[in-house]
Image: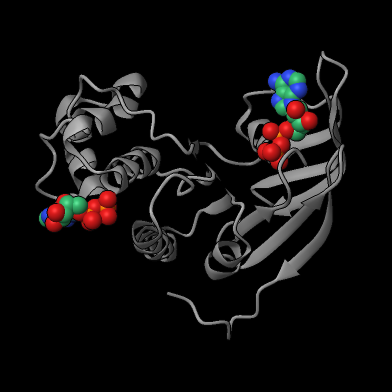
Amino acid sequence: VPTLALNDVTKDFATGTRALTGVSMGISRGEFVSVVGPSGCGKSTLLRLAAGLDTVSHGELAVDAAVTSFVFQDATLLEWRSAQKNVELVGELAGVPSAERSRRAREALALVGLGGFEGQHPRELSGGMRMRVSIARALVAEPQLALFDEPFGALDEITRLKMQTELQRIFQLKQFAAMFITHSISEAVYLSSRVLVMSGRPGCIVEDIQIPWEYPRP
Ligand code: ADP
Ligand code: ADP
């Protein structure tokens, strides 16, 4: 059973815009799938549907995951909370006891290379470090489905390369199902096991490309 499955999905907005048409695809555990395509072809709409932030107009969408996490381009951290408390938020909302959620948050921050930075507030951290807090917050709930909407789009080239390597390492470790939206075809090829190419307005998937395992990875 795929973790995320769409069958002939159409999305119409109340404004009359049809954003997606005839989208069918599946993502299984251990698959890192990038979605590329020009601005306006419906990539973000597709991700928002998968996240349950919006509903399909026609067709079917099924998620077989107890926990779905998403990461957006702006790290959307709570400025008045430390890195540790930002990551703990997820556990607080889920009613995880304080000692346990503290332990898990520390572990998640260590995983993204931020051990020792637990007490820092977002404004004290670089852009890359804020994005790492955001990724730690997404992964602390051990999601089966992780959705990324251009998370590295606002980072400089060096930080971006570091973050790609970091995310690959974490993915190899955790093996969730991932959908990763990006403008960059090289980023998509570098990170993914599959690349979905979208095109058109309304957008649809025009290519589904397996990246051969021989392709050099970070
Ligand atoms: P992409 O992420 O590929 O740039 P989007 O999914 O953001 O594309 O947008 C696809 C199309 O849907 C665009 O024409 C956009 O203007 C439209 N759209 C996106 N969100 C909304 C919305 N909430 N209401 C109306 N139209 C929207
Ligand atoms: P970014 O993730 O934005 O690239 P950098 O790794 O370039 O951040 O680091 C920005 C600053 O924070 C640098 O001065 C770096 O030494 C420091 N820094 C970042 N991560 C760590 C870490 N895990 N341990 C110690 N210092 C760090």
Quadrant of the rendered image holding ligand 1: top right
Q: In this view, does 201 lie above or below 30?
A: above
Give the image location of residue 203, x and y in percent: 83, 42
- Position of 56 compared to 108: left or right? right
Residue 113 visible, this orientation: no
Q: Residue furthest toward the top?
A: 14
Question: Looking at this view, is 99 or 69 the one in front?
Answer: 69
| Residue at the extreme front | 156
Judge whether 205 appears above or below 66 on screen. Answer: below
Question: In the picture shown, does residue 146 fall above or below 165?
Answer: above
Residue 77 seen in the figure = yes
Rendering coords of residue 72 (x, y %) = 49, 37
Image point 82% across, 35% down: which residue? Answer: 60
Left/right placement of residue 156 relative to residue 88 reads right
* Front position in the image: 211 or 4: 211
Quadrant in the picture for the C terminus? bottom left
Relative image position of residue 94 (x, y in whole percent): 36, 23
Q: Viewed as shown, does residue 77 lie left or right of 119? A: right
Rendering quarter of residue 83: top left
Count up the numbered dots: 0
Residue 159 % position (x, y): 34, 57
